[in-house]
């Protein structure tokens, strides 16, 4: 079953579940449209250091690491391929 739920407001942010199918019409304005993905997971999850997601920096939001991950420093600008 699918349900169409159009947004009738000019939104600055839209949040949705990562498995929800979503889309929008083409951007015909002169303004940039960008996306940002943030995923939260328990501190017990080990993040793979190889594969397609290896270039993504990982940050500890709270608590303490229980899986031995390497974390990025929030104050250091992100550079692809460098954690």
Image: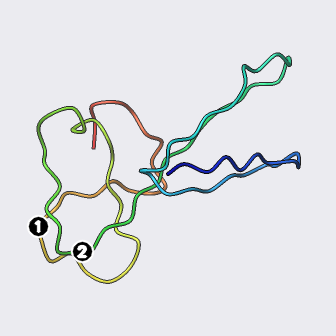
Seen at 40% across and 58% down, the residue is 39
Seen at 57% across and 40% down, the residue is 22
Residue neighbourhood size for the residue with mark 2, other residues' Cα within 10 Å, grouped as few (<14), some (14–19), many (≥20): some
Residue that carries the numbered disc 2 in the rendered image: 43
Seen at 34% across and 68% down, the residue is 60
Q: Where is residue 9 in the image (x, y as percent from the top left)?
A: 88, 49
Secondary-structure class at tag 2: loop
Please state if 34 lies on the left or on the right of 60 as rendered. right
Q: Position of residue 53 (x, y in %)?
A: 25, 38
Along the viewing direction, whichever of 54 and 11 lies nearer the viewer: 11
Along the viewing direction, whichever of 79 and 17 lies nearer the viewer: 17
When the figure is inspected, residue 44 is found, relative to residue 69, above or below; the finding is below
Please state if 61 lies on the left or on the right of 31 as rendered. left
Q: Do the residues labelled 1 and 2 touch (CB within 8 Å)?
A: no
**Total numbered labels:** 2
Residue that carries the numbered disc 1 in the rendered image: 68
When the figure is inspected, residue 41 is found, relative to residue 13, above or below; the finding is below
Q: Where is residue 50 in the image (x, y as percent from the top left)?
A: 11, 38
When the figure is inspected, residue 68 is found, relative to residue 12, above or below; the finding is below
């Amino acid at each position: 079953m699918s349900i169409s739920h159009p947004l009738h407001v000019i939104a600055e942010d839209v949040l949705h579940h990562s498995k929800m199918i979503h889309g929008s019409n083409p951007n015909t304005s002169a303004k940039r449209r960008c996306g940002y993905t943030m995923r939260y997971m328990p501190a017990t999850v080990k993040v793979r250091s190889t594969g397609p997601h290896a270039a993504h920096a990982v940050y500890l939001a709270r608590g303490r690491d229980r899986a031995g991950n390497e974390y990025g420093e929030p104050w250091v600008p992100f550079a692809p391929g460098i954690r």
